Image (cartoon, rainbow, N blue to C red):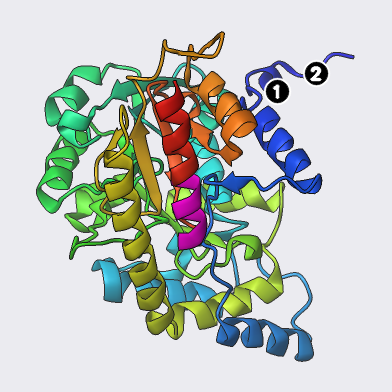
Amino acid sequence: MTVATRAKKINPSPTLSITAKAKKMQSEGINVISFGAGEPDFDTPQNIKDAAKNALDNGFTKYTPTAGILELKKSICDKFEKENNLKYSTEEILVSCGAKHSIFNAIMILIEDGDEVILPSPYWVSYPEMINFAGGKPVFLQTSQETGFKITPEQLKNSITKKTKLFILNSPSNPTGMVYTEEELKQITDILVENNIYCISDEIYEKIIYDNTKHFSIASFNDNIKQLTIVINGVSKSYSMTGWRIGYAAGNKELISAMSNLQDHSTSNPTSIAQYATVEALANNTDFVTKMVKEFNSRRDFMVETVNSIKDLSTLKPNGAFYCWINVSKIIGKKFHSKIISNSLVLADILLTEAKVAIVPGCVFGDDNYIRLSYATSMKNISEGLERIKNFVNSI
């Protein structure tokens, strides 16, 4: 059997074997603590559930327009104007089956064979796979703790070639949790506009932010950057609705129309019931978000303090999302019993087998000297899991 060349461009996830092994251990009754969660551990608010139930009872179970129901698109426009100082018409909004779907649509309609896409590293695992699938070439800009895991204007300028088509921005970031400031974004804006480079701004963690840090949407600075930007957002993280699969994109009419056409012939509309639930989510859940972020903040502080007290581990305090990006470079190359910890994937496997702790290796995000820990789990699990990691590190 021969699969299409485009399918061969997609690499299997190196974490699948660890995930499968962790689930198998849990099914056997082994107490595995997982720091891998990419979703809030809170339930979806009841008023959102009720809105979905009302949609069912009122018979809203049929196809909707591909780009989303008008009521939801109006709610999204209102959200952008109120919270991000961005004015869009409903024709400039596309509702998709999750933010990942929105990003996929955007990359597919922008990138042609040979186009270069500038991607700050560490990066979310799916970005380079989508770029490769579209025939593009990821151009990685490596960041470090010294720069707060954010690119510099000089890095961006020096990476631009005649083939550069797109820049992908993710703030707050997965996996680092870092947030670009207003001034940093303005510097990026000037460079992108000067070179006529498109921007996909992934803002899915927008509301999960700490320490009075303010989120700025890059598209809000001027009309030139707005015309070049596709803003991506959704309800998965902010309202603990990961399984509802609703994301959305905003951009100029031509780009959104092309994305909608692609969606016409791939998935069609997102689930009708989930769309009606999302109208409620965007309208009436400020208190829920505040409460959730407050709890995440407590967990973050505890995790950062504890990790930095463990020999050979360190982490910066993230400004957003719900991950800590842990530097394990002092462990890489050491031996555990007779096995050399040669990279983050090996470390992840040993931690699971020996300490019964599941983590995500940094190699999947573009940096083998790190691991990602999620604090989207209970304080009890965080405390016990970090104690296990500490004991493991001390035994090396």
Left or right position of 306 against 194: right
Pointer 1 and pointer 2: residues touching (CB < 8 Å)? Answer: yes
For label 1, the residue is 7
- Measuring from the top left, give residue 258's x and y in whole percent: 53, 47
194 versus 252 height, above or below:
above
Amino acid identity at mark 1: Ala
Quarter where residue 326 is shown: top left
Most foreground residue, 310 or 35:
310
Whether residue 36 appears in this view of the structure is yes
Question: Of residues 137 and 184, which is closer to you in this image?
Answer: 184
Question: In the image, is residue 39 part of the stretch drawn in magenta?
Answer: no
Q: How far apart are marks 1 and 2 (CA)?
A: 7 Å
Q: Where does label 2 land, which residue? A: 3
| Residue 203 in the figure: left or right of residue 274 | left
Which residue occupies 18% across, 42% down? 189
Q: Which residue is rendered at x = 80% and y = 18% of the image? A: 3
In the rendered structure, which amino acid carries the disc numbered 2? Val
**As displayed, is residue 220 above or below residue 329?**
below
Q: In what quadrant of the picture does the N terminus appear?
A: top right
Residue displayed at 61% across by 25% down = 14
138 vs 304, nearest the viewer? 304
Q: What element carries label 2?
A: loop
Q: Where is residue 223 in the image (x, y as percent from the top left)?
A: 21, 54
User: Is residue 381 covered in magenta?
Assistant: yes
- Quarter occupied by the C terminus: top left
Boundaries of the magenta span: 377-386
Q: Look at the picture and state if 286 lies above or below 346.
A: below
